[in-house]
Image (spheres, rainbow, N blue to C red):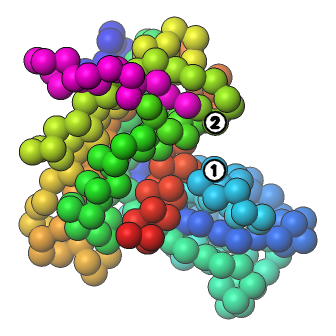
Amino acid sequence: PCDAPPCVTQRFVSKTSILTLSEEMLASGGTISDAKESQAGLLDLKLGRAYHDVGANKYVMVEEWKSRDNMTATEDILSSFIGTPASTLTEEATLKQLDVATVQSMTCSSERIVTVEIQPHYSCKKLWKVLASPGYCAWVPGCRSAAITSADHAKHHETAATLYMEGGTTLPALIAKNWKERKVSISVLSNKELPGYSGVITLDEVKSRKGFFPWSKGNVCNLKHEYRFNIASLSQSNIESFEQYFLPDLYTKLSRK
C-alpha cells in the first residue's frame, strides 16, 4: 500500500516500439499533441531518443491507452506526426514493436507505486539469464551497470552494490537475487538521486488462455515489475523510464542470446 491516503489509481495498457527516424521525417509532419488528439482512448504518447542504443536516429515510442480495445496500429499514429503514409511507413522507418504491458499506477501524498506486467515472447529461463546477470540494472531509471561491493547479508541475501548512472554519478544500493523464485529486488540508498526508489521484478511461468499476442497462450512467462519512488523524484526526467529504457534494453540483450 501507499504511505498515506488519499490515493489516486490509474490503470492503462502500454505499448512500446523501437523506431529508426530521420530528422527530415520528424520535421515534415505534425506534433505529438496532434497525434494524441486524433486517437480516441490514447492517454499519452512519448517519443524520445533511445537510451539503450546510441546509434543515430534510434527512438523509442511509448503509447499509453485507456484499454486494449482502444488500441490502433502504431503505423497510423506515426504517420500523423512524421508526414509519412502508414502504408509505406515500415519501408522508410524501421519499426519494432515490443510487448504490450498492463500498468497500474497509484499516487499518494508523497510516493507513487507502479506495477507493470508483460508476457514477453521468451521463456522465463532466457529472461532470467539477462535479469540475473552480473552488473545488469537497466530496470533502475538511468542505471548503466552495477558493481558488487560486499558479500550477501546472511538473512536476506542482500548484496551491497554501487550503481553507475547515465549522468556519470554513482549511487549506493542493496540488491537481492532469489534464484529459486526468479526474483530480483533493489533499494537505492541515496537521498539526493532517486530518493526512496525500490523495485522488485519476478518471473512466473503461468498458463494463459488468452493474451495480447498469439504466444500469450499455454505456458507463458509473466514478468511483473513493481517499483516505488518519492513524488519529489518526478522532477527527474528519467524516473519513469521503464518502457523507454528497460524494455528496449532487455529485448536487445535477449536478441543476442
Dot 2 or dot 1: first in sequence order is 1
Q: Secondary structure at mark 2?
A: loop
Quarter of image, res 25? bottom right
Magenta span covers which residues? 148-164
Question: Quick check: 193 above or below 66?
Answer: above
Q: Which mark is residue 162?
A: none
Magenta stretch: residue 154 in it? Answer: yes
Q: Which mark is residue 51?
A: 1
Q: Is residue 56 above or below residue 150?
A: below
Q: Residue at x 32, y 20 (%)?
A: 150
> With respect to residue 72, does 131 lie above or below?
above
Q: Are marks 2 and 1 in contact (CB under 8 Å)?
A: yes
**Residue drawn at 42 percent across, 44 percent down:** 136
Indicate which label's residue lies in the foreground, 2 or 1: 2
Left/right placement of residue 57 relative to residue 229 reads right
Residue 37 percent location from the top left of the image: 68, 57
Q: What residue appears at the point 49 percent right and 28 percent down from the top-left corner?
A: 163
- For residue 149, what is the image quadrant? top left
Secondary element type, mark 1: loop
Residue 43 visible in the picture? no
Amino acid beneath label 2: Glu
Q: How many residues crowd around disc 1 within 10 Å: few (fewer than 14), some, or many (20 or more)? A: some
Question: Going by the image, does 73 lie left or right of 254?
Answer: right
Q: Quadrant of the C terminus?
A: bottom left
Q: Residue at x 70, y 89 (%)?
A: 91
Q: Nearer the viewer, residue 11 or 102?
A: 102
What's the mark number on residue 166? 2
